[in-house]
Amino acid sequence: MTDPRIRERRVRVQRQRGRRRLRFLVAALLLVALCAGAVAALHSPLFAARTVLVSGDQHTSKAQVIEVAGLEHDPPLIDLDTGKIEHRLEGLAWVAKASVHIGWPSTVTVELVERVPVATSRLAEGTWAIYDVTGRVLSDETARPSGLPIVQVGGVSVAPGAWLRAWARPMLETAAYLPVSLLPRIAEIVNNPSVGVVLRLRSGITVIMGDDEALSQKFVSLATVLSRVDLADISKIDLRVAASPVLTPLSSASNVHGKGDG
């Protein structure tokens, strides 16, 4: 026969175990309820992207940013993937870099770094394309953009957001280094397969730049020659050796070195 005290102790132990299981079940249910409430709250308008702040949008409209980023219908902040949004925004023609930041409870901040236009060219359909130094086509304009040198790309047809081929890069690098003071004297920049990049001056003189190395020094030399040398009988200026310009006269096929204070 079991001692009543032992039986009573067993009953107490079983009751304690039951109470612990009940407390655990209640805690689990409360936790589930809290999680469900938190998820519901995070997907509510309280934590939605109601405010979108955009900076650096000089050529890219805020409406375009909001549409491409997928923020036009105030999505929940918790559902936003900033990396994917940045990638989509960097697909826009003018956008070089996009940074997206979430600010709880309801703000998305978009910071854009736009590309810098360096050159333009006339397209096959008669419009004008604008390029950055990488060959990205930034826009398609009906009138020639002011303040940009013309690069000769053969009348290709390219849409904003597309890229010129690699052969155009040296011309664009040259355009990017071109001093503003020399821009009025440049008719166009072309790529000559035999000598490299060539500048055609409005005066009719051809300037051979060669590759896109030492461009700063080449333009210093060119500016010096243009300001100090009588170029009335000169047909070519060869700057392939940046510090030693070579001048070709109209009346001779031989090369003549430019004089410092001619």
Image (cartoon, helix red, strand yellow):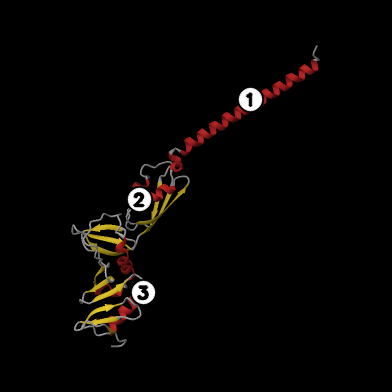
Marks 2 and 3, the one that precedes in the sequence: 2
Point out residue 119 in the picture as x, y percentages from the top left corner: 28, 65
Q: Name the residue under label 3.
A: 216
* Residue receiving disc 1: 22
Residue type beneath disc 3? Ser
Depicted 107 relative to depicted 156: above or below: above
Find residue 42 and report its horizontal and vertical position in percent. 47, 39
**Residue appearing at x 30%, y 87% in the figure:** 259
Q: Based on the displayed image, in which of its 4 quarters is residue 11 positioned? A: top right
Residue 65, which numbered label?
2
Viewer-proximal residue, 112 or 221? 221
Q: Which of the two discs, 1 and 3, labels the residue nearer the N terminus?
A: 1
At label 1, which amino acid type do we have?
Answer: Leu
Query: Does the residue at mark 2 contact the one at mark 1 (Cβ under 8 Å)?
Result: no
Cβ–Cβ under 8 Å for marks 2 and 3:
no
Which dot, 2 or 3, sits closer to the camera?
Answer: 3
Q: Could you give the CA–CA distance between mark 2 and mark 3, rounded to whole angstroms? A: 36 Å
Q: Which residue is drawn at 27% across and 78% down?
A: 237
Instruction: State how far apart marks 2 and 1 are (Cα).
Output: 53 Å
Q: Position of residue 37 (x, y in %)?
A: 51, 34
The secondary element bearing badge 2 is classed as helix
Residue 187 is situated, as x and y percent measured from the top left of the image, at: 22, 71
